[in-house]
Image (cartoon, grey):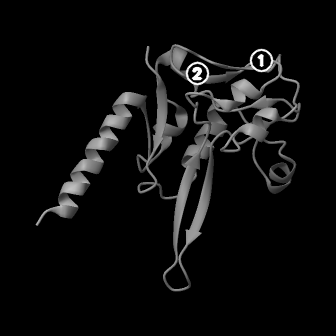
């Protein structure tokens, strides 16, 4: 089995937060409010971030849907002193075994994306690419299925990469055609 991933297309995201809600529903995560966000006691495994750019009159907003990247060489795996985080060699998922987690937050400190989340029990939890959903029905992650603008796609890394290379090449040809 090859490495699976979720590809995010910033040009398609409309900032509807449907992916974030679908993730919370699928994983039975508690509703999110401002107090939980400040205290980080209500995990958000997939979050939508709003990024503004430009100046008054020419400003624009982009949205970024962010979750665990399931990195090839995941720094969180190396940083965990208890071995609670592992990389599945078959499909590339980075998984957490909460029974081994001591809540030291070393994984959060080293993660370049700030992904690890902590629940009321103080232990790390994060996206597992809807492992249960995949094992039970073979379905793609809930966030991908729910995205109305198709900004999220799930598949083999090599195929996702090939598709994006082809799109970039086509755009280059169109932009440079005389």
Residue at (63, 29) in percent of width and height: 74
Residue at (51, 86) in percent of width and height: 57
**Snapshot quadrant of residue 174:** bottom left
Q: Nearer the viewer, residue 6 or 167?
A: 167
Q: Is residue 110 visible?
A: yes
Q: Quadrant of the N terminus?
A: top left
Answer above or below: position of 123 versus 52: above
Q: Whole-Å distance between the Cαs marked 2 and 1? A: 20 Å
Residue at (70, 25) in percent of width and height: 77
Q: Nearer the viewer, residue 100 or 109?
A: 109
Q: Which of labels 2 and 1 is toward the front? A: 1
User: What is the x, y in percent for residue 171?
Assistant: 25, 55
Classify mark 1: residues with Cα within 10 Å, few (<14), some (14-19) or many (20+).
some
Q: Sequence order check: which comes first, mark 2 or mark 1?
A: 1
Residue 86 in the figure: left or right of residue 35: left
Answer above or below: position of 114 versus 6: below
- Name the element at disc 2: helix
- Name the element at disc 1: loop
The residue singled out by tag 2 in the image is: 131
The residue singled out by tag 1 in the image is: 83
User: What is the x, y in percent for residue 128?
Assistant: 62, 27
User: What is the x, y in percent for residue 119?
Assistant: 82, 35
Q: Residue furthest left?
A: 178
User: What is the x, y in percent for residue 117?
Assistant: 76, 38
Classify mark 2: residues with Cα within 10 Å, few (<14), some (14-19) or many (20+).
some
């Amino acid at each position: 089995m090859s490495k699976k991933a979720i590809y995010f297309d910033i040009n398609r995201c409309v900032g509807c937060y449907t992916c974030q809600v679908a993730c919370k529903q699928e994983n039975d995560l508690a509703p999110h409010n401002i107090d939980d966000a400040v205290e980080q006691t209500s995990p958000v495994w997939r979050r939508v971030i709003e990024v503004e750019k430009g100046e008054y009159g020419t400003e624009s907003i982009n949205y970024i849907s962010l979750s665990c990247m399931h990195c090839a060489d995941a720094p969180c795996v190396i940083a965990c002193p208890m071995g609670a985080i592992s990389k599945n060699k078959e499909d590339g998922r980075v998984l957490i075994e909460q029974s081994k987690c001591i809540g030291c937050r070393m994984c959060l400190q080293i993660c370049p994306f700030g992904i690890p989340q902590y629940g009321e029990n103080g232990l790390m939890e994060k996206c597992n690419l809807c492992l249960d959903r995949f094992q039970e029905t073979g379905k793609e992650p809930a966030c991908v299925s729910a995205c109305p603008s198709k900004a999220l796609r799930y598949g083999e890394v090599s195929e996702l990469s090939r598709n994006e290379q082809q799109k970039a090449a086509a755009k280059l040809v169109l932009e440079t055609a005389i």
